[in-house]
Image: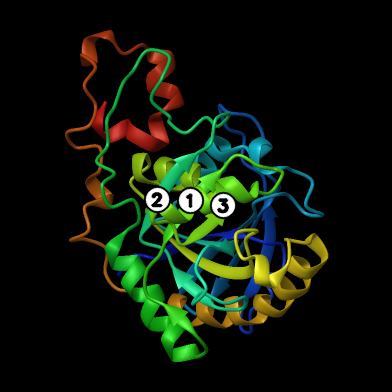
Amino acid sequence: MSETTVGIIGGTGLYEMDGVGDLEEVRVETPYGETSDAILEGRLGETRLLFLPRHGRGHRLSPSDVPYRANIWAMKKLGAEWIMSVSAVGSLREEIRPGDVIIVDQFIDRTRRRESTFFDDGIVAHVEFADPVCPTLREHLLASAREVGGTVHEKGTYCCMEGPAFSTRAESNLYRKWGAHLIGMTNLPEAKLAREAEICYATLALATDYDCWYEAGGDVHIEDILEVLAANVARARAILAKAIGGLPERGGCGCPDALRHAIVTDRRLVTDEVRDRLAPIAGRWL
């Protein structure tokens, strides 16, 4: 049986799970510049883990400045088959309370400054994205979260905004009318790029606050968010450890073959430079 490699993208403390050993820093040169930080490679049982702090250690990178393409390219280069994304979000629904866990199933894109495809500058691909997270990994995360306990919401639509400022009250109410359940600033570029890279991707979202639509709770204050976020970290680690310990077989979700019919560019027009750049992502299709 081949080794399983799992990427985890989130905060800097996620690698502090019981049983994780053999940690070492790995730096990957990518065609898209440096990753957010060095990747921490380790092991939990028989599973190889790749931890990447999305905003860099010390939270140096704003949501718009996270090098999403470099991060996902590096994960793919290092062999990641699965990516579990851990994200702090604001709640747009009264029933989703600070401290709750949500296993995201849909996204709305409100970003404006993000590079969110590997297929540009000489090559075009159109991946299917109706269901933007891997259903197999999503169901597995959901089961793991329920085993750990606490309030878990089995689905939710994540509205990804540009940031770094929080929403206006008008925007917050608009997103509610659109049917969004959560507001965040990072996950949609990751999900799109992971699909192009044929990696199974899912989001473990942790509600830190009610967004500013909820006037009964007062406006959003960063100090309150950080307090709830700190309390959520231990729970996130427990869910991840549970999920990593019993991953299902890949397949049946479509993610491992997302590019099979997606690349529309005539292969004769694809340059060597493009082939080299995309070798980890799409080499077998080029």
> Could you tell me which residue is drawn at 36 percent across and 11 percent down?
271
Q: Amino acid at mark 1?
A: Tyr
Asked which secondary structure carries label 2, the reply is helix
Residue closest to the eye, 115 or 82? 115
Q: Amino acid at mark 3?
A: Ser
> Could you tell me which residue is drawn at 79 percent across and 60 percent down?
222
- Residue 172's label in the rendered image is 3
Q: How far apart are the alpha carbons under marks 2 and 3?
A: 10 Å
Q: Which residue is mark 1?
A: 175
Q: How far apart are the alpha carbons under marks 1 and 2?
A: 5 Å
Image quadrant of residue 207?
bottom right
Do the residues under discs 2 and 3 have CB atoms within 8 angstroms?
Answer: no
Do the residues under discs 1 and 2 have CB atoms within 8 angstroms?
Answer: yes
**Labels 2 and 3: the sequence-earlier one:** 3
- Residue 178's label in the rendered image is 2
How many neighbours does mark 3 have within 10 angstroms: few (below 14), some (14-19), or many (20 or more)? many
Asked which secondary structure carries label 1, the reply is helix
Image quadrant of residue 219?
bottom right
Q: How far apart are the alpha carbons under marks 3 and 1?
A: 5 Å
Do the residues under discs 3 and 1 have CB atoms within 8 angstroms?
Answer: yes
The C terminus sits in image quarter: top left
